Image: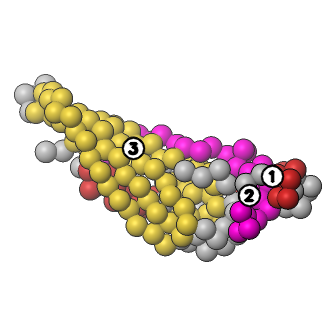
Amino acid sequence: MEGSGAVGVGERWPGHEARDEGGTEIDLGVAVGRVHVRTAEPIGVVDLTARVESFLAAVRLEAGWVNVQTRHTTTGICVNENEPRLVGDVLALLERLAPRGAGYAHDQLHLRPGVGRDERPNGHAHAKALLLRTAETLNVAQGRLQLGRWQRVLLVELDGPREREVSLLAMGERRR
């Protein structure tokens, strides 16, 4: 599953100036951004790695950390291999642990006050999301994510297709 979307960036480098051992000035600060994704399937994985790296390049983060956080209760963020058979295995595991149609009280929409007509039964998606993380914090060095050979930053969609938003927060040293 691949989603379409864009990366938005906002910066705030508060002017805390430091110098390295050679006397070169270093900017320390924080930058925030958003990734917007339209998922295409009810359940699947969207590789966010290139979008996160584009954000890092746009804010010129040289060394530090980037936090990648989903803004939804029916998605998760993970770092793993984006190999189709492995992805299928992981999604099948989640389905075994929290199957659709297992009688979730959350799915009794008529008993929940304020639920709109467009709401769909998704107790299974919330239960699956509890098994995943909402965020990952990753090291950045020389302007690049410090991922292993097969590691990718993944958004796990559990209740699609939907418009999704991922929050990015980078902290550290910025290239001048």
Name the residue at 66% across, 67% down.
160
Residue 100 in view, yes or no: yes
Q: Which mark is residue 19?
A: none
Name the residue at 49% across, 54% down.
166
Q: Are marks 1 and 2 in contact (CB under 8 Å)?
A: yes
Residue range in magenta is 115-143
Secondary element type, mark 1 = loop
Q: Write down the residue under mark 1.
A: 112
- Left or right position of 96 against 128: right
- Left or right position of 44 against 152: right
Q: Write down the residue under mark 3.
A: 169
Q: Residue 167 in the image: x percent, y percent?
A: 45, 50
Q: Disc 2 marks which amino acid?
A: Val
Distance (Cα) linking label 1 and label 2:
6 Å
Residue 84 in view, yes or no: no
Which numbered mark, 1 or 3, is in the foreground of this view?
Answer: 1
Disc 3 crowd, CA 10 A, few/some/many (<14, 14-19, 20+): many
**Front one among 160 and 63:** 160
Q: Write down the residue under mark 2.
A: 115
Disc 1 crowd, CA 10 A, few/some/many (<14, 14-19, 20+): few
Q: Residue 4 in the image: x percent, y percent?
A: 49, 72
Q: Disc 1 marks which amino acid?
A: Arg
Secondary element type, mark 3 = strand
Distance (Cα) linking label 1 and label 3:
35 Å
Q: Residue 129 in the image: x percent, y percent?
A: 70, 49
Distance (Cα) linking label 2 and label 3:
32 Å
Secondary element type, mark 2 = loop
Q: Disc 3 marks which amino acid?
A: Leu
**Front one among 151 and 41:** 41
**Magenta segment includes 130:** yes
- Left or right position of 112 against 173: right
